[in-house]
Amino acid sequence: MKINSLTLFANSNSLITDERQKRIKDNLKLVNQVVNRLTYLISTDNEREDLISYGVIGLIQAVDKYDAAKGTKFEPFALLRIRGAIIDHIRSLDRLSRGSRQKVKALSATIQQLEQEIGGAPDDGQIANRLNISLSDLREIQKDAATMTLSLDSCLSEDSEETWVDQLSDESASPEEKCEQSLFIGKLEKAIEDLPERERLIIGLYHYRKLTMKEIASMLKISESRACQIHNRSISLLRSKLENAF
């Protein structure tokens, strides 16, 4: 991450007070932390810079809206705002055409069909052959599938720090909602258990241990791009299993 470009971005707002500006600068590392965990969605350096810029916007919003009196620590509050701003930006681009969305649906249907035929998760070669596409085209569709899943990580509303995923453990939910949540969690856990070992491992390292793709790649002794590909494949497999759960 280019700290200088972030600093210039923060300094460009003439309304920033010294104390506010210091808090933004002191926490720019949080933007880098979030962007590093989204490398599987980044294709170019320009895309990375865009995500950094929107992450800084989220950080500034966090600084402005943070209320220590509520008993919440600043860092987790800011991380949620930064991630929310970045994800909202990605979703606003709506880069997936109707055709791309149809391809994601076709991918899920194909995986479901192959799983029934072979009794387990199909490999990329089997999926590509059934769809009559190249492996590189398949990986683009898998990336689109991962992008479409981002909606679950978005904030519920402008004034909410809670994400859709957070609702799965919402203690204030009604008995009916808690029942639905329990059923969904059960389906999700079963879907993860049914993943091939490598895919299950990467899902665990990324979503539960919160490692970056770079850290995962180093641990598994593979390239970062390969780790991203496996993660996207994992998401596409999970989508095929959870189509009726969303």
Image (tube, rainbow, N blue to C red):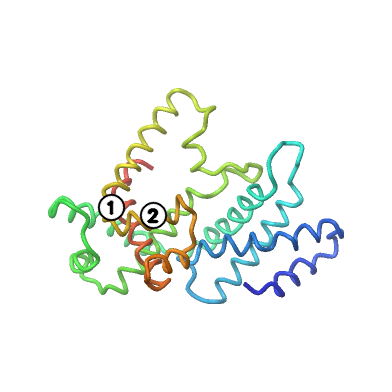
Q: Position of residue 169 (x, y in %)?
A: 49, 35
Give the residue pinned by disc 1: 195
The image shows residue 92 at horizontal and vertical percentages of 55, 59
Q: For the residue carrying disc 1, how many other residues have a C-alpha within 10 Å: few (<14), some (14-19), or many (20+)?
A: some
Label 2 vs 1, first from the N-terminus: 1
Do the numbered discs 2 and 1 sit on residues whose CB atoms are within 8 Å?
Answer: yes
Going by the image, does 156 lie left or right of 231?
A: right
Quadrant of the image containing the N terminus: bottom right
Q: Give the structural element (helix, strand or loop) at label 1.
A: loop
Residue at the limit of the structure toward the top, as seen here: 175
Residue at the (55%, 76%) spot, across then down: 45
Q: Which residue is mark 2?
A: 203
Residue appearing at x 56%, y 71% in the figure: 48
**Residue nearest the viewer, comparing 139 with 205:** 205
Tell me the residue at 80%/60% (across/down): 22
Q: Residues within 10 Å of mark 2 (few under 14, many from 20)?
A: many
The amino acid on which the numbered mark 1 sits, given as a three-letter code, is Leu
